[in-house]
Image (cartoon, coloured by chain):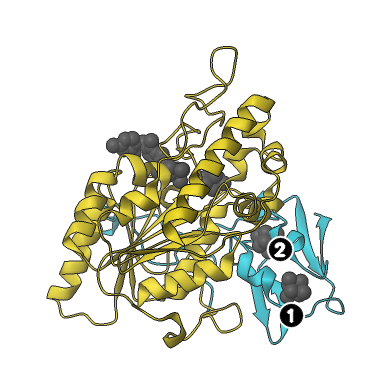
Chain colours: A cyan, B yellow
Amino acid sequence: MDRPKKTEFKFPTHIDEYPTGPQYAAGYLPETNAGWRSVRPVVDHDACVYCLRCYLLCPDGTVVKDNGKITFDMDYCKGCGVCAHECPKDAIEMVKE
Amino acid sequence: MTNLVDIPKVNAKNMTEKEFFYGHKACAGCGGSIAVRLALKVLGERTYTALPAGCMSAVGFIYPQMAFNTNAIITTFPGSASMASGIAVGAKALGQKDVKTVVFAGDGGTADIGFQALSGMIDRNDDVLYICYDNEAYMNTGIQKSGLTPYGTKTTTTPAGDNIPGTITHKKNLFEIIAAHDIAYAATASIGYPQDFLNKVNKAKHIKGATFIHVYASCPTGWGTPTETSVEIAKDAVDCGLIFLAEFEDGEYKLNRNPKQFAPVQDYLKKQGRFKHMSDADMQCVIDNRDKKWSRMRKHWL
Ligand SMILES: Cc1ncc(C[n+]2csc(CCOP(=O)(O)OP(=O)(O)O)c2C)c(N)n1
Ligand code: SF4
Ligand code: SF4
Ligand code: SF4
Ligand SMILES: [Mg+2]
């Protein structure tokens, strides 16, 4: 797995289950970030030349290389628009949710 | 001299598809998270990651959320470098091979409060890559001035008004201060030049001992810029000469970019809410300081 996925949080029932600091199991994500978004990226695959600039610069790592095509992890994309703004081919459009 | 051509280059095409900083709660478009994400993709899974108080720890460790997929820990605000030193020598004592220890600390955590520990870490030449992501203020606590906040910036501790035009001091020469330790490798970078940043992280990864990278990383929330322009603004800063790209290696400075002509500083400043109030005279003060710095760099570093 390249990216962690949302994991269900189970409330600790015993003192031994509480961590001793703010650290926790790597990649433990009890909630998604999708609700932050008011716009979403949509890629025009005909215009895209797969240069991977969007993949490189996404602050959240939610641009996915999907068998030679660009897709997005919509659970964690925040809709910042960096991918669309940086695309040299204007192949990504930000559309209202 | 570690020759870059000898190290396999890491780029968007060949870098690992694994994400090591994922699902974090940084503001949309956060430049600091671009720096952390990219650096960890170069450094890989076997990286001990230490972060002091600051945005990148605050957005990565929200119990029980854990956005780091490397071994990661929050340190005290002034103690990230000493904690990282301990991790690095601990790993050595355990005979661990192919591990790297990295620090991601803000400008406040580096140039101000964490400086003493950082100086000691470099002096001992502990095997740590220390990356300072510079968003030019204490952002996590609501935009206070740090030693790396540039002249004219409006912050909550340097408000712009009739008495002062925002921040009245220029940025500390952090890179030169680090170089003065005779560190094996130090570099400046910007997320606006991502391949250059990847190359520098990759180079530092392959050097044993203390290394340092100062990366310019935009903050749409603290700078008053649209979320989508985070990379553009970090590139503009370099193109107008307020941020320079350089390396220090084997006692020698190297200017990586020495443009014949700079883009207008005014255009860069006017794009950002934090500089909106600046008068022509204040902008001229910024330009004069830039020119002074560049004439010094060109005289001694070329
Ligand atoms: C000893 C101590 N003093 C103050 C704080 C409060 N504090 C936490 S984060 C922070 C600001 C960090 O600024 P910077 O290092 O620039 O990182 P940024 O938040 O900008 O990413 C401050 C003042 C603290 N945690 N510990
Ligand atoms: S930046 Fe644009 S052209 Fe390049 S891969 Fe992304 S969508 Fe395609
Ligand atoms: S909108 Fe922002 S978070 Fe979403 S995929 Fe594009 S760059 Fe990443
Ligand atoms: S305040 Fe700035 S540095 Fe902090 S998470 Fe938000 S954008 Fe990033
Ligand atoms: Mg800061």
Read off the residue under disc 1: A50
Image spot of residue B116 (x, y percent): 23, 45
Left or right relative to A85: residue B3: left
Image spot of residue B93 (x, y percent): 12, 74
Graded by Cα atoms within 10 Å as few (under 14), some (14 to 19) or many (20 or more), the crowding at tag 2 reads many
Disc sitting over residue B75 in the figure? none
Which chain is home to disc 2? A
| The one of A44 and B257 positioned closer to us in this rendering | B257
Outermost front residue: B299
Read off the residue under disc 2: A83
Mark 1 CB lies closer than 8 A to ligand 2:
yes
Question: Which amino acid, mark 2?
Answer: Cys
Mark 2 CB lies closer than 8 A to ligand 3:
yes
Q: Secondary structure at mark 1?
A: loop
Image spot of residue B42 (x, y percent): 46, 74
Q: Residue at x 33, y 39 (%)?
A: B112
